[in-house]
């Protein structure tokens, strides 16, 4: 018996996948929306998903990994995930997605825009076919903002201080984003600190932020320095691009801080 072709759209809690869900709501009424919940997400992400779900008028299926982050951290010998070893994406995002899909023939809709040069996560499973509506229809970032505005959904609140969705302790966060987490969610910042290791006797040092621990980053003089540099950089960007929105200036300023590419499956 041949399975019915399914249409699925993964949401990250970010602007692009959310705008794509809005864009496809009436174009593909049978669309299945899902969110891979690591249970380590920001409160703003869950709040935003509830808002989006109300607009879509159908449930956003929450996919939970069979084993959580702490289990896999232990399995990987206490090594925190990093850009070199992204086991968190594989075990907490990709694996639950592929289990959700199973062996059914599926069209997977991905929110890569026409003004981006990337593909996003593409499963190697032969039954999954990626679809890029924004690329096909010429939808750019300005169009994404407009889709969210007209729908009344707007941007996630974390965009005030962070440029991507994902776990609150995501290792791709810039220094200023860690400061933002400390200011807005001090409890989560403290939990993130507890995962770090610094054993001088064994020369073991696992930290979320490259080059320094969160304990070091949280020192008042270091926080003040990070905020000062960010403010100066944003002022410079604003002067050079007077027509840009605050979010765009903020996003570009943080992008200049480093050029590491975050996990696309997490932050679309």
Image (cartoon, rainbow, N blue to C red):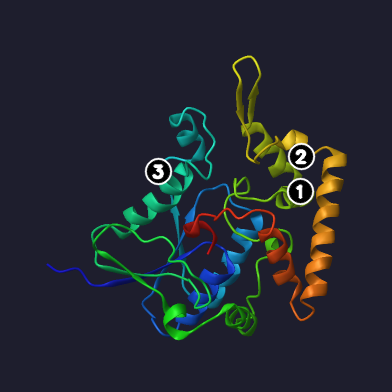
What is the residue that sits farthest to the top in this orientation? 201
> For the residues marked 2 and 3, what is the alpha-carbon distance in whole angstroms?
33 Å
Q: Which residue shows up at 33% across the image and 55% down it? A: 98
Earlier sequence position, callout 2 versus callout 3: 3
Of tags 2 and 3, the one toward the viewer is: 2
Q: CB under 8 Å between callouts 2 and 1?
A: yes
Q: Residues within 10 Å of mark 1 (few under 14, many from 20)?
A: many
Earlier sequence position, callout 1 versus callout 3: 3
Residue 258 visible in the current orientation: yes
Q: Residues within 10 Å of mark 2 (few under 14, many from 20)?
A: many
Does 155 appear above or below 158?
Answer: below
Residue 132 x, y percent position in the rendering: 41, 75
Residue 44 x, y percent position in the rendering: 66, 59
Task: State the image quarter where residue 222 is shown.
Answer: top right
Earlier sequence position, callout 2 versus callout 1: 1
Identify the secondary structure beneath mark 2: helix
Does 221 appear above or below 95?
Answer: above
Picture quarter with the N terminus: bottom left
Q: CB under 8 Å between callouts 1 and 3?
A: no
Residue 56 visible in the current orientation: no
**Residue, disc 3:** 66
Relative side of 177 to 153, left or right: right
**Residue, disc 1:** 179
Q: CB under 8 Å between callouts 2 and 3?
A: no
Relative side of 78 to 148, left or right: left
**Residue, disc 2:** 217
């Amino acid at each position: 018996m041949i399975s019915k072709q399914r249409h699925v759209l993964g949401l990250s809690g970010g602007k692009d996948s959310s705008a794509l869900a809005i864009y496809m709501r009436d174009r593909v009424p049978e669309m299945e929306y899902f969110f891979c919940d690591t249970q380590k997400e920001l409160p703003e992400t869950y709040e935003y998903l509830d808002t989006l779900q109300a607009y879509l008028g159908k449930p956003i299926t929450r996919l939970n990994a069979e084993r959580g982050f702490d289990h896999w951290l232990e399995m990987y010998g206490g090594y925190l995930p990093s850009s070199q070893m992204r086991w968190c994406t594989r075990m907490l995002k990709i694996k639950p997605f592929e289990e959700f899909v199973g062996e059914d023939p599926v069209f997977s809709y991905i929110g890569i825009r026409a003004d981006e040069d990337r593909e996003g996560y593409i499963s190697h499973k032969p039954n999954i076919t990626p679809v890029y509506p924004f690329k096909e229809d010429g939808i750019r970032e300005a169009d994404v903002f407009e889709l969210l505005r007209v729908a009344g959904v707007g941007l996630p609140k974390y965009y005030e201080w962070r440029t991507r969705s994902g776990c609150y302790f995501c290792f791709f966060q810039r220094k200023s984003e860690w400061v933002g987490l400390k200011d807005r969610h001090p409890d989560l910042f403290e939990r993130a600190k507890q995962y770090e290791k610094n054993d001088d006797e064994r020369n073991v040092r696992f930290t979320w932020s490259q080059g320094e621990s969160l304990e070091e980053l949280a020192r008042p003089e270091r926080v003040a320095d990070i905020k000062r540099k960010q403010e100066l950089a944003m002022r410079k960007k604003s002067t050079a691009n007077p027509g840009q929105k605050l979010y765009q200036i903020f996003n570009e300023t943080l992008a200049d801080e480093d050029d590491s590419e975050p996990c696309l499956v997490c932050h679309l």
